[in-house]
Amino acid sequence: MKLTTGLITAFAGYVAAAQQSAQVFIVPAGDASSPPAITPSLARLLLLQRLAPSGRGLSLHDIPNGVGPEHAVSLISRFGKNIPPLFSDGQATEPSQLVLMLEGMDDKQMKDLQKALSMSPSFTIADPPSDKAHQDLMELDFYRAGVADGSKCSIQQLVNPLENCWAGKRSAAAKFSIKKNPELLDEVPKQIKQLIRLAKSGELQATIVALPSTKSSSNWLDEQQQELRRRQAEQVISSFDRPAANAEPTSTPKPEPIFDSSERIKACYETKEACMASTRNCSSHGECQDKYAKVDGSKNTGACFSCHCQSTRSTSGSLTTWAGPTCAKKDVSVAFWLFAGFTLALVSILYLAISILFNVGEEQLPGVIGAGVSRSK
């Protein structure tokens, strides 16, 4: 009996050791001399921190149960994206973030990918989750964080943040099955030079997650986080099942903002479609045009599409002029100068009138008038 128990324990340890770990490559590569092995829940925390836009930071619920905040902050400072300073000038822009998840890889493909990338993994994920868990991570966690889903795009399109796959957002994620499409494994190393160039220029940072084939039943969430997700899903379902007659709005819903504050509006876009997608068609108050377009209609080598704002006339006949990078602001410069000019002219006229009256009062009376009113002796 003791021998059987020992054999079972040894076999379980052998299976756990033989389980291939997932590898995570971060571009630009940092110090990967000793990549740590972390749990899937901690890896999820790091991926969400890199993808979450500004203003949608992580909460305490995202930290796995049993992990201290100090350890989580240490991992984020090492493998997460750089956090902008609190008192910044507002001109520095954060690089876009891309996460590529390659699932269904065997041991040989994992080694070939690491060799083709010519870099060591930043960290590894012990006991990686199943393919079903990868789908939930994309459709639930990344979607709630406001991340663009680029799984239907090619890898060549994803490495360009100006493509329509990004939908004008600052972060995108895509999941590809290497088991179904093994040719995709050759496409990633071809784009590594482009990723390194964009990373050095501060435009894009990429995270490549190599996920092996596994029959594990583990998840990206721990038990406490899974229970929280289950309760949130039940709340959403119950809100849809509630009868419409009992729903009485207590306050007027706030209108959704036209633009997300975390989105970056560039001065130039390479294509007209990218300009229209990022600026919401110039807020319907203008048109995306090439600044450097030639008069004869020929194309330049470097295009620069930006919003050309136009004026709109309301039903009452008033004319409104629009301005700003997205033509979302009203141009009040004409009204301001009219008001300022009228005020300045009125003050000048009043000053001249007072000056004339003062100068007339200072003049002496003529001698004839003075003699007529003098007292006789």
Image: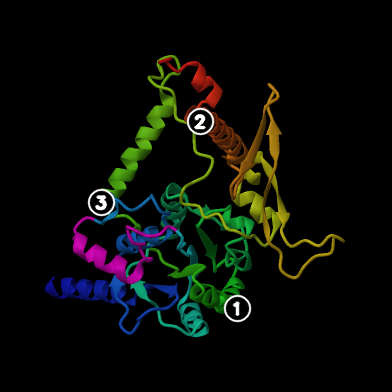
Tell me the quarter of the image containing the N terminus. Answer: bottom left
Q: Is residue 162 left or right of residue 38?
A: right
- The local secondary structure at tag 2 comes to loop
Residue occupying the far front of the picture: 377
Choose mark 1 or mark 2, whichever is in front: 2
Pick the front one: 215 or 167? 167
Q: CA distance from mark 1 to mark 2?
A: 93 Å
Place of residue 227 in the rendered image (x, y in percent of width and height, measured from the top left): 28, 45
Place of residue 316 in the rendered image (x, y in percent of width and height, measured from the top left): 68, 21
- The local secondary structure at tag 3 comes to helix
Choose mark 3 or mark 1, whichever is in front: 3
Q: CA distance from mark 3 to mark 1?
A: 39 Å
Q: Amino acid at mark 2?
A: Glu
Residue occupying the far right of the picture: 296
Q: Residue at x 41, y 51 (%)?
A: 141
Q: Is residue 282 above or below residue 209?
A: above
The residues colored magenta run: 65-90
Number of the label disc, if any, that sits on residue 60:
3
Q: Quadrant of residue 344?
A: top right
Q: Quadrant of residue 64?
A: bottom left
Marks 3 and 1 in Cβ contact (< 8 Å): no
Counting residues from the start of the chain, the first of labels 1 and 2 encountered is: 1
Disc 1: which residue: 190
Pick the front one: 131 or 175? 175
Q: Amino acid at mark 3?
A: Leu
Counting residues from the start of the chain, the first of labels 3 and 2 encountered is: 3
Disc 2: which residue: 363
Pick the front one: 273 or 288? 288
Q: Residue at x 52, y 74 (%)?
A: 201
